[in-house]
Image (cartoon, rainbow, N blue to C red):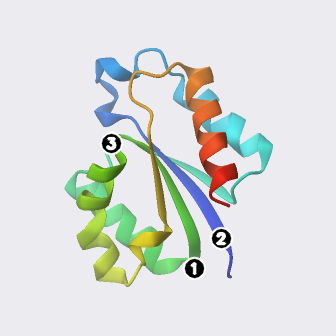
Amino acid sequence: MAGIKGLILCVFGGTCPSCKEMDVLKVLDAIRQEKLVDFVEYHPQICTEDGNQYLKDLLGNMSIDKLYVAGCDPLMQKKMFQKSFKAVGFDKAKLIAIDVRSLTTEQAVAGIKELIEKNP
């Protein structure tokens, strides 16, 4: 399959105070219902060892053209995922990241939608 776009939402272990105003399932469902991407995923802490393995498994088994990750600082995401991307030959330019810390559900949905629309 070619042309796949997906969204991963990371919530920093689920205990970070910066996520207290966001309903993760509502965010994912809103993006899914808009059909802006081919899949939506949730990961509790993608920067961990199991998160990096998850990325390798996902990216090594799918032909993904754009991977949107809503989580922490976009620059940090690019640095943290470098090894996983390199291990499976995923072009880091295909990562489009957004910081959703301290956002409400509505703000996160609006920010992710804007990110996807500006980076189709």
Residue drawn at 59 percent across, 47 percent down: 115
Residue 38 pos. (x, y %): 69, 60
User: Which is nearer the eye, 12 or 108?
Assistant: 108
Where does label 2 land, which residue? 4
State the residue in front, 33 or 101.
101
Who comes first in sequence, dot 3 or dot 2? 2
> Label 1: few (<14), some or many (≥20) within 10 Å?
some
Residue 63, numbered label = 1
Mark 3 and mark 1 lie on one chain; the one further toward the N terminus is 1
Residue 73 badge = 3
Q: Earlier in the sequence, mark 2 or mark 1?
A: 2
User: Where residue 104 sits in the image (x, y, percent)?
Assistant: 52, 18
| Quadrant in the picture for residue 33 | top right
> Residue 71 at what x, y percent from top left?
40, 41
How far apart, in angstroms, are the residues tagged by discs 2 and 1?
6 Å
Q: Marks 3 and 1, Cα distance to the nearest angstrom? A: 25 Å
Mark 2: few, some, or many residues within 10 Å (few <14, many ≥20)? some
Q: Is residue 58 above or below residue 13?
A: below
Q: How many marks?
A: 3
Say whether marks 2 and 1 touch (CB < 8 Å): yes
State yes or no: discs 3 and 1 in contact (Cβ < 8 Å).
no
Which circle, 3 or 1, is nearer the viewer? Answer: 3
Question: What's the amino acid at mark 3?
Answer: Asp
At x 24% / y 60%, what residue is drawn? 79
Residue occupying the far right of the picture: 34
Quadrant into which the C terminus falls: bottom right
45 sits to left or right of 21: left
Q: Secondary structure at mark 1?
A: loop
